[in-house]
Image (cartoon, helix red, strand yellow):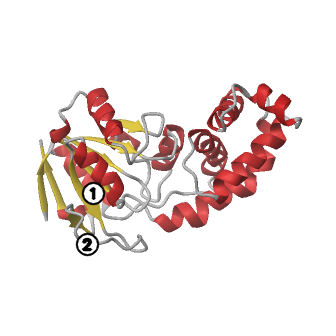
Amino acid sequence: MINAQAAGVLMDVEGTTSSVKFVYDVMFPFARRELAAYLAQAWGEPACQAACEQIAADAGHASLEAWSSTADAAPRDLVETEATRLMDADQKATGLKQLQGLIWKNGFDSGEMVAHVYPDVPPALDRWRAAGADLRIYSSGSIQAQNLFFGHTQQGDLLPLLSGHYDTTTGPKREAASYTSIAADWGLAPASILFLSDITAELDAARDAGLQTALLLRPDNAPVEPGHGHAEVSSFGEIEVRP
């Protein structure tokens, strides 16, 4: 058991609140399958264009138009090719995550996708909120995708239990500065935040920023090397939080 004195709990998603398998076996294949159709259908929409411009920026170009001129290729073809390459490499690029979030919206809105969360998560969120803790998410998935995910779970809409969301626009999850920025935005001292993740490198970065940490040992998570120095739990039911 972990008894944490914390005003806030910051949570990762895959491997922490939710199964890695759902993300990799359901969400990622859906985005890959629907990529071309989505770009064709939504190309002129502002949200789609914003994501595509970010993909161009992530690739080192001043704009999508400049990229198209340099490559002598249609902008939509460039975006589709680059997004596919990033997915093949399992890259956490901001533009890709924005585009995936837009594609996933169709899946969640249609009911084709319903997000998996571990059964111990909702009661723990209820318990921590009742104790007075502020609960937030930090994921490589876009904030839009996070809202879709937690708004359409097998346990119902969990968004009312969450007070905020952070993604890679704040910074990489394996850099201490990202957690410093989150604490500042939150208005909490780093030491008063408990960060939960299944990735030791993320926990290391959070600890370097002064946060409390705990490692989730969920089924199907990657093996963890010993000696990492973080408290270990297999369930949110093993964590008690008091502000």
Relative to the observer, which residue lies in front, 177 or 106?
Answer: 177
The residue tagged 1 is: 123
* Image quarter hosting the N terminus: bottom left
Question: Which of the image's four quarters has the C terminus?
Answer: top left
Give the side of residue 204 with respect to residue 78, left or right: left
The amino acid sitting under disc 2 is Pro
Regarding mark 2 in the picture, which secondary structure is present there?
loop
Q: Residue at x 54, y 57 (%)?
A: 114
Relative height, residue 191 to residue 87 (above, below):
above
Of mark 2 and mark 1, the one earlier in the sequence is: 1
Q: Is residue 85 left or right of residue 182?
A: right
Q: Is residue 83 left or right of residue 195?
A: right
Query: Residue type at mark 1?
Result: Pro
| Residue under pointer 2 | 226
Residue 242's mark?
A: none
Task: Residue 92 in the image: state x and y as whole percent.
Answer: 54, 48
Is residue 152 visible to the viewer in this orientation of the structure? yes
Q: Quadrant of residue 64?
A: top right
Measured from the top left, where is residue 98 in percent x and y? 60, 39
Vertically, is 2 above or below 140? Answer: below
Instruction: Give 51 or 33, whichever is nearer the viewer.
Output: 51
Q: Residues within 10 Å of mark 2 (few under 14, many from 20)?
A: few
**Residue 53, percent across and down?**
68, 30
Instruction: Give the CA separation, mark 2 to mark 1.
Output: 30 Å
- Say if residue 40 shows up in the picture: no
The residue under the point 47% across, 61% down is: 116
